Amino acid sequence: QVQVVESGGGLVQPGGSLRLSCAASRIIFGFYNMGWYRQAPGKQRELVAAITTFGRTNYADFVKGRFTISRDNAKNTVYLQMNSLKPEDTAVYYCNARHIYAPDNDYWGQGTQVTVSS
């Protein structure tokens, strides 16, 4: 059974940093585009950042210049480095894995809470 597991969330003060990790198992990681999404209370889930199998990245405007997505194919892991965090970044962050040739092979993690507060 495919597993996508996020880690690294927590409580951080405004201006601080966190690094989220997402480990995927039982998939051929190199065939999956990976993405980070977030969902704040009362809001829809939204894309934060994505990275293709070739390493091409895409960011939501609200995180450009602050967040960096990267992947380590040898470790089946994708990362989200979050700097200059703001209270409005508070949300549950989800990792997504989507097969490049079979989009129905679409897997989500359980989410990790990020809270930015003083």
Image: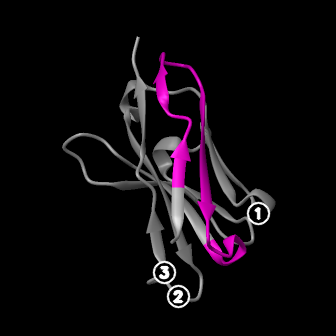
Question: Is 110 placed left or right of 58 in the picture?
Answer: left
The residue located at (67%, 78%) in the rendering is 31
Q: Which residue is mark 1?
A: 73
**Residue at (58% x, 64% y) in the render:** 34
Residue on which disc 2 sits? 102
**Left or right position of 54 against 59:** right
| Amino acid type of the residue tagged 2 in the rendering | Ala
- Disc 3 packing (10 Å; few <14; some 14–19; many ≥20): few
Question: Which residue corresponds to mark 3?
Answer: 105
Q: Could you tell me how far apart the alpha carbons at marks 2 and 1 are, in whole angstroms?
A: 19 Å
The Cα–Cα distance between marks 3 and 2, rounded to whole angstroms, is 6 Å
Looking at the picture, which amino acid does disc 3 mark? Asn
Q: Secondary structure at mark 1?
A: helix
Stretch in magenta: 5-32
Q: Amino acid at mark 1?
A: Asn
Instruction: Give how far across and how far down residue 44 sits, in percent.
Output: 26, 53
Q: Are marks 2 and 1 in contact (CB under 8 Å)?
A: no
Residue 86: where, in percent of width, then height?
45, 26
Whether tag 3 and tag 2 are in contact, CB under 8 A, the answer is: yes
Relative placement, left or right, of 21 versus 106 is right
